[in-house]
Image (cartoon, rainbow, N blue to C red):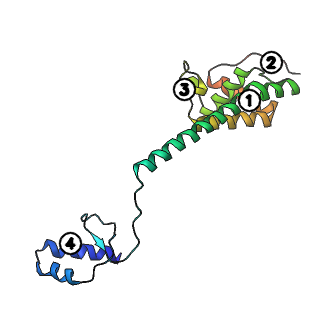
């Protein structure tokens, strides 16, 4: 705060045309050049304070971007593997082993997970031609995986409830089921 006040006072004095004051300040010992952070001018340096961080070179920024891009791609591949494992293996296997699940096929599990994640029919949000998985961001895919894992851990009752909600979002009642 004090450093900024010095800058404001100096700017005011210089703006008023007091030409002898700059000479007075020229005789003072030079402070270490540390920006105070005010926006008065580029030459505004305060007395004391913390040094400003040096801006990274463009080569460093480019290396970081490449590194993060490959990390994101690896993360995306892991998410897709988990998604397809849940949809094609784990959920259908759980449906077969427990029996009497309202849905048993992979595309049905995908529909239920996606519709419940988005809160509406998934192809109202994503590109149907491109496909759901390829259209989703990593955050969306992660959220849909969370719904699918809830289906797996919750079992038949959770799947039945989420399936009804998905069908309701699409304006459908679903096939009549026998109570057994």
The answer to which of marks 2 and 3 sits earlier in the sequence is 3
Q: Nearer the viewer, mark 1 or mark 2?
A: 1
Q: Quadrant of residue 106?
A: top right
Res 19 quadrant in image? bottom left
* 4 or 3: tag closer to the N-terminus: 4
Pointer 2: what residue? 177
Please tell me which residue is depicted at 57% across the width and 31% down the height of the picture: 136
Point out the frontmost of discs 4 and 3: 4
Q: Where residue 85 is drawn, which disc sits there?
A: 1
Q: In terms of sequence position, does the residue under pointer 4 or pointer 1 come before the other?
A: 4
Mark 4, residue position: 11
SS for tag 1? helix
In the picture, which quadrant includes the C terminus?
top right
Q: Secondary structure at mark 3?
A: loop
Q: What secondary structure is marked by label 4?
A: helix
Instruction: Count the labels in the image.
Output: 4
Are the residues flagged by discs 1 and 2 in contact, CB closer than 8 Å?
no
Real-space CA distance between mark 4 and mark 1, rounded to the nearest whole angstrom: 66 Å
| Mark 1 or 2, nearer chain start | 1
Is there any visible trace of residue 121 in the rendered image? no
């Amino acid at each position: 705060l004090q450093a900024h006040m010095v800058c404001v006072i100096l700017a005011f004095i210089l703006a008023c045309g007091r030409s002898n004051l700059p000479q007075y300040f020229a005789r003072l010992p030079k402070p270490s050049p540390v920006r105070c952070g005010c926006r008065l001018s580029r030459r505004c340096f305060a007395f004391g304070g913390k040094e400003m961080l040096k801006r990274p070179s463009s080569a460093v920024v480019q290396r970081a971007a490449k590194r993060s891009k490959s990390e994101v791609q690896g993360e995306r591949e892991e998410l897709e593997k988990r998604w397809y494992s849940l949809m094609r293996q784990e959920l259908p296997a759980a449906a077969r082993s427990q029996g009497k699940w309202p849905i048993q096929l992979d595309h049905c599990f995908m529909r239920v997970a996606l519709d419940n994640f988005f809160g509406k029919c998934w192809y109202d949000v994503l590109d149907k031609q491109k496909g759901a998985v390829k259209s989703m961001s990593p955050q969306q895919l992660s959220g849909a995986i969370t719904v699918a894992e809830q289906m797996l851990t919750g079992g038949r009752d959770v799947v039945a409830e989420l399936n009804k909600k998905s069908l309701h979002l699409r304006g459908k009642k679903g096939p009549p089921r026998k109570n057994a």
